[in-house]
Image: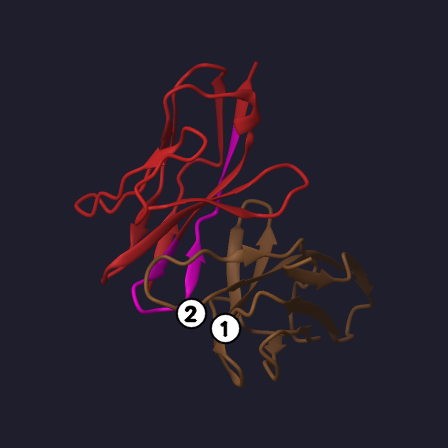
Chain colours: A red, B brown
Amino acid sequence: AQRVTQPEKLLSVFKGAPVELKCNYSYSGSPELFWYVQYSRQRLQLLLRHISRESIKGFTADLNKGETSFHLKKPFAQEEDSAMYYCALKGAGSYQLTFGKGTKLSVIP
Amino acid sequence: DGGITQSPKYLFRKEGQNVTLSCEQNLNHDAMYWYRQDPGQGLRLIYYSQIVNDFQKGDIAEGYSVSREKKESFPLTVTSAQKNPTAFYLCASSIVGQGAVEAFFGQGTRLTVV
């Protein structure tokens, strides 16, 4: 079975402060991990995936297989980062895409 | 306009009636998914399909049924057996391939059962 845990339902930070959204996963094989974002009144969309190892909108995420984590980080939060963030997992060779419960990020001006 | 389209945006039904939610994509994607989104529950997978005429149950398939007769279409039927059908339903599609492929989502259908 595959499982994704996002321990924080809501995270509030001040503008300019660092952000870390936590994600832990459970999967016995090689996972493919993603962060999706849903801005107000917009579709759920991909933010980044672990395999690309790139920074999108200032966000980065590193897969730590030892700790089974894929935390999302940004050094300086912006007001436009306020949104719902979902961590997701797909097993290599599988098509089942499993999401966590999501974390609502609120950036205070 | 390419993408994934769900219709209708809002749907009201009486308790005990079956209802079918539409999902169409013109992205030529092989894989399609249905999720249910409830406050505090995130997205829970109902059914997914990786090829025409084939689909698998997700984590909460009870009370739902799907079909995949065409590549472009993956309708979801919410049956009267579903105990708590009022929810926001999301459809997604992706290519089938190796690597971390992106899923594209529709705008969703909000179903209210009264």
Q: Position of residue B44 (x, y in %)?
A: 51, 59
Q: Nearer the viewer, residue A79 or B16?
A: A79
Examine the rendered structure and indicate whether residue A56 appears above or below residue B78: above
- Taking the spot 45% from the left edge, 56% from the top edge, the residue there is B102
SS type, badge 2: loop
Quick one: label 1, few (<14), some, or many (20+) residues within 10 Å?
Answer: some
Q: Position of residue A73 (x, y in %)?
A: 36, 30
Drawn side of residue A56 relative to residue B24, left or right: left
In reply to whether residue B85 is colored magenta, the answer given is no
Q: Earlier in the sequence, mark 2 or mark 1?
A: 1
Q: In what quadrant of the picture does the N terminus of chain A appear?
A: bottom left
SS type, badge 1: loop
Q: Look at the numbered discs 2 and 1 and tell me whether their residues touch, using CB distance below 8 Å.
A: yes
Q: Which residue is mark 1?
A: B30
Q: Which stretch appears magenta?
A: A89-105
Amino acid of disc 1: Asp
Which numbered circle lies on residue B51?
none
Amino acid of disc 2: Val
Q: Quadrant of residue A106?
A: top right
Q: Which residue is mark 2?
A: B96
Q: What chain is tagged by disc 2?
A: B
Q: How many marks?
A: 2
Q: Quadrant of residue B114?
A: bottom right
In reply to whether residue A95 is colored magenta, the answer given is yes
Drawn side of residue A9 relative to residue B5, left or right: left
Examine the rendered structure and indicate whether residue B83 appears above or below residue B103: below
Q: What chain is tagged by disc 1?
A: B
